[in-house]
Image (cartoon, grey):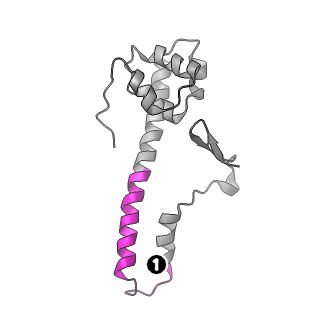
Amino acid sequence: MSGFVDGEKTMAEQNYANHVKWVPAFHFFRDAGAGAEPGRVHLPVVLAALVALLFLARLFALKVQDRVIRLEERLRMERLLPADVKPRIEEFTAAQLVGLRFASDRDLPELARKVLSDKIQGTKAIKLMVRNWRADYLRA
């Protein structure tokens, strides 16, 4: 069963039978060309496939960026958070970690504690709470 909890999509428990990710826009074009005779694919289909490819490439890059941010911030929190907050690192959602990445090392412990205690969810709300901004010039 999947749904949304605290602004993040929840997924059914993953196992071998359901671990494959199906991306209809990607798989449609791959499968559409599989049965066609060479030279019979029409220009509109090719153009639509290219547009879909560009769109999906951006979405996939953003998803990878979010996963890297999640890893970086968890490692940074292991280093910077006080002992009483470290056990709660797994409670942060990906969106919260994305917002917290802009907090300076000095401000992170206090802001992280506030995000958890007040259950602040939106990346924008968290970014607005950052006092000493930590720039991220390597975004995709």
Q: Is residue 53 above or below residue 103?
A: below
Q: Position of residue 49 (x, y in %)?
A: 40, 70
Q: Judge whether residue 138 is colored magenta.
A: no
Instruction: Provide the major secondary structure of the magenta segment.
Output: helix
Q: Residue at x 37, y 26 (%)?
A: 102
Per the rendered image, the range of residues in magenta is: 33-60
* Amino acid type, callout 1: Gly
- Given residues 113 and 4, the one toward you in this image is 4
Question: Does residue 135 appear to the left or right of 75 in the view shown?
Answer: left
Q: Quadrant of residue 107?
A: top left
Which residue occupies 60% across, 57% down?
Answer: 20
SS assignment at label 1 = helix
Residue 66 seen in the current view: yes
**Residue for badge 1:** 33
Q: Is residue 20 above or below residue 73?
A: below
- Residue 111 at x, y = what percent? 47, 18
Q: Residue 80: in sight, yes or no?
A: no
Indicate the position of residue 26 as horizontal and vertical percent values.
48, 64
* Quadrant of the rendered image containing residue 17: bottom right
Q: In percent of the image, x 48 and y 34: which residue is there? A: 70
